[in-house]
Image (cartoon, rainbow, N blue to C red):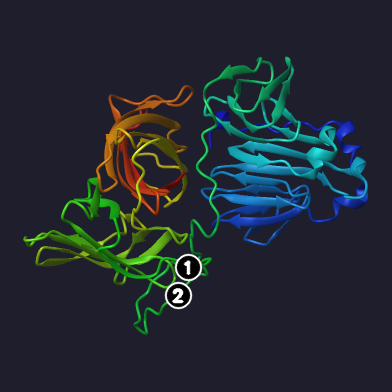
Amino acid sequence: MQENTTFRLSVLTASMAAMFSPALYAASAGQVEFASSGVNAIGPNGQSRPLAKGAEVQPGETIDTGTGRAQLRFTDGGYVSLQPQTQFRLEQYGYDKDDPKKNGIVMNLLKGGLRTITGLIGKTNREGYKLQTATATVGIRGTEFSITGFPDGSIVFHTTDGAIDVSNNTGSTTVNGGQSVSVNSPNSTPTKTDEKPFLPPTVSLAQTQIPAVSQNDSTTASNPVTTTTVVAPLLTGTFTGQWRAITGSGGYGNSYARIWRAQIGTGYAGKFTVAPSGHATSLGYSAPNTNLNLSFDLGGAKAQSYGNDGVMAWGRWTGTGATQTMGSNTSAQDYSVYPLHYVVGQPLTEMPTTGTATYNMYGGTAPSCFGPACGGISVGSSLNINFGTMEGSYSLKVANSGDNVNLSGTGGFALSSAGTFSGSATMNAVSGSAAVVGSAYSNIDGFLAGKGATHAGAGYSVNYTALSASGSTLIYGAAVYKQ
């Protein structure tokens, strides 16, 4: 990590330290609600321990997410979602429901990004709530807000609900709900900006399952079935016909990402099977009156980064042992280098004929990245659809910490009567991120799902060449949305 990408630790004042009762230091501050593999807690003595769901969080510990993510719930009900490539320190914590004057929390975002919702400490003793960064300190009025640091050292603060006070050596600025400010250094005045912190969606363990052991539904003795608990109800079984669409993206010809889709309404019948553990084991489509068919079978390969919430199911296949059938030809597939990503959903029924809707990305697969410098990848996306005109648009943001590239783009699409769509967009570098050479672009191919078009799924791909890189970068994956 280059020095200019790291947040420097702010010094806590003695007056803040005096707010806390020594008896409260030893108590647990809260628990981990979710942590993906590789998230660690580092104690004041430098010792590191892995974090998993249910683990306690202690004052003085630093949470390092690495390429993963974590969600923390404090004893006062406060919530913090930590993004990839984040270091977050809980400096001090004390909560006494019977004596609000003893309540206080001091947090320090050393680098990366977070989203937080304040708990009872922020409601009963606002003066005792502080979140520090390298460029400014946040005080609250009972709120929800997000913070993201950029490669040039600047930090964007965005308030979702309520208001926050962003303070540094230049004074204090109030940021109300829906507003953002950018702060370049401790001595620079916070500047209003339209840029919102770039954060991937907050997802639960039930929505995005990243198993500690890769899943495999083979029944051979040498490759036994292993499963991970996923919250019911799930989409399981084999589905043909009544399912509206099936979408996947994966390496094709070992050079680029290709997106496949099959849907009812245009003559193609989608069919797929979802295992009891919640991930798809086969998917494909066939066309009437022709020999055209395309199907993929998991076989001995592994299913990873999968989710299943009862309406949508998504995941990524990796490793060897999968097969692809095109027409009458079946061939072995190796997804070790270029994983295949998929998303499927319940049938679309009662699609609206008037009005508009916004869909926000709430889950998806861990993206695949191929290029000269792939680091932690963050993805965020949304859809806007006008059902009266059957037109829509998508927005997509992708950040790669490996080359400090942060791209954003918006593209239009036409919505078919079957509820499918596809589009492309020019991607532009966000202010403060590394420049790209020539054109950067994204492609998306998706479908609406559920009664009343409540959900959507899509495969996406992004291509660009960083100015400092010797070659192009490809990022692709699957995303799920809901209104």
Badge 1 element: loop
Mark 2 closeness class: few <14, some 14–19, many ≥20 residues within 10 Å: few
Badge 2 element: loop
439 w.r.t. 219: above or below: above
Observer-nearest residue: 422 or 324?
Answer: 422
Give me the C-alpha separation between circle 1 and circle 2: 8 Å
Q: Reading the chain from its start, which is encountered first: label 1 or label 2? A: 1
Observer-nearest residue: 308 or 420?
Answer: 420
Q: Amino acid at mark 2?
A: Thr
Q: Residue furthest left?
A: 290
Residue 357 position within the rendered picture, expressed as x and y whole percent measured from the top left: 42, 38
Observer-nearest residue: 391 or 302?
Answer: 391
Q: Is residue 465 visible?
A: no
Residue sitting at 84 percent across and 56 percent down? Answer: 27
Residue 192 occupies quadrant: top right
Q: Residue furthest bottom?
A: 221
Relative placement, left or right, of 421 versus 433 is: left
